[in-house]
Image (spheres, rainbow, N blue to C red):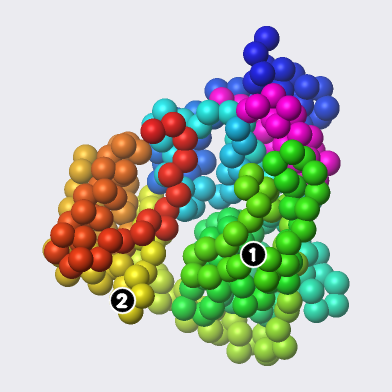
Amino acid sequence: MNALDRMADTLAREGLSTSQDAPLAKKTWWRVGGPADLWVEAGDRRGLARVMSLAHEEGVPVFVLGNASNLLVSDKGIRGVVVRLVGELAGAAQVDRTLTLGGGARLVQLLKRAEREGWTGLEMLAGIPGTVGGAVVMNAGTRLGELSDALIDVDLVLADGEHGTATVDDLHMSYRHSELPEGAVVAAARVRLSDEDPAEAFAHVREHLEYRARTQPVDVPTCGSTFRNPEGNTAGRLIESCGLKGTRIGGAQVSEKHANFLVNTGGATATELRDLIDHVRATVAERTGVLLRPEVVLAGEW
């Protein structure tokens, strides 16, 4: 019995949902990618800590898969353990003017609940199809702001399974960037609610979502913005200026609607999408002198 078999057996006996050689493509927004060696769903901090400590003891890598909305999984898949946070690790609770959000909470559902409950202060996350944990890692945001505007602190499960915490200052957050301890997983995040009128706040959200629907491809498999905006410009504007809209490699295409979106037109592979990313970067660098930085995260064995 190898390390992954031992982990699968132990975690299943302890009540966690596990699956070996688990397909991932249908779990990703680009609908591409190979399998996970071991898929595990952790529903509370204790379960997550157990996964992390076992993996640490066995020397097995751990990858946390949120909503996979900003992720390109290799055609060969992801080696080691792939974890998804569910149950209480995907919930939300209010105490006074503070929300505690599970790292696995999905932002789209969170914003819908925020509107029902009259929670304001999370409008900057509107339209982002990710999770709270991913939003912390990337300091996710839109034209309405960034998560760091509202974040207070985070609860972490460290690489060895121990508990950790970090304040927003500890994370040194900047544009699409934060600094977590290596291998740490965001179990929960605390955010500060604002005093803005809910009707006014969610009017801004609806306006923002309508703008996204008009300007971005929302009806095809895509991972949103592929590249980070360089200072003083936008990635989409630079890509379009190089005549790259509509450029294809296999089933992967630069969107005709928004040049910073790469789409799967049907049957694309992860390799084709990565090749298109590399082609766009090289072309923009050659013609404009700007080397675009990917916002999309590459995962797995390349």
User: What residue is shown at x 77% (from left), y 40% (from top)?
Assistant: 161
Q: Position of residue 290 (x, y in %)?
A: 25, 66
Which of the image's four quarters has the N terminus? top right
> Which residue is labeled 2 in the image?
233
Question: Tag count in the figure?
Answer: 2
Q: Nearer the viewer, residue 27 or 234?
A: 234
Q: Quadrant of residue 216?
A: bottom left
Q: What stretch is highlighted in magenta?
A: 37-60
Q: Position of residue 76 (x, y in %)?
A: 42, 28
Which of the image's four quarters has the C terminus? top left
Badge 2 amino acid: Asn
Q: Nearer the viewer, residue 91 or 163?
A: 163
Q: Does the magenta stretch include residue 220?
A: no
Badge 1 amino acid: Leu
Q: Position of residue 120 (x, y in %)?
A: 68, 80
Whether residue 103 is situated above or below residue 12 in the rendered picture: below
User: What residue is shown at x 85% (from left), y 77% (from top)?
Assistant: 96
Q: Which of 232 and 118 is in front in this view?
A: 232
User: What residue is shown at x 51% (from left), y 48% (from top)?
Assistant: 68
* Label 1 packing within 10 angstroms: few (<14), some (14-19), many (20+): some
Q: Are marks 2 and 1 in contact (CB under 8 Å)?
A: no
Q: In which quarter of the image is residue 237?
A: bottom left
* Label 2 packing within 10 angstroms: few (<14), some (14-19), many (20+): few
Q: Where is residue 132 in the image (x, y as percent from the top left)?
A: 64, 59
The numbered disc on residue 171 is 1
Q: Is residue 54 magenta?
A: yes
User: What residue is shown at x 81% (from left), y 29% (from top)?
Assistant: 15
* Helix, strand or loop at mark 1: loop
Q: Mark 2 to mark 1: distance in Å? A: 26 Å
Sequence order check, earlier mark of 2 and 1: 1
Q: Which of 209 and 17 is in front in this view?
A: 17
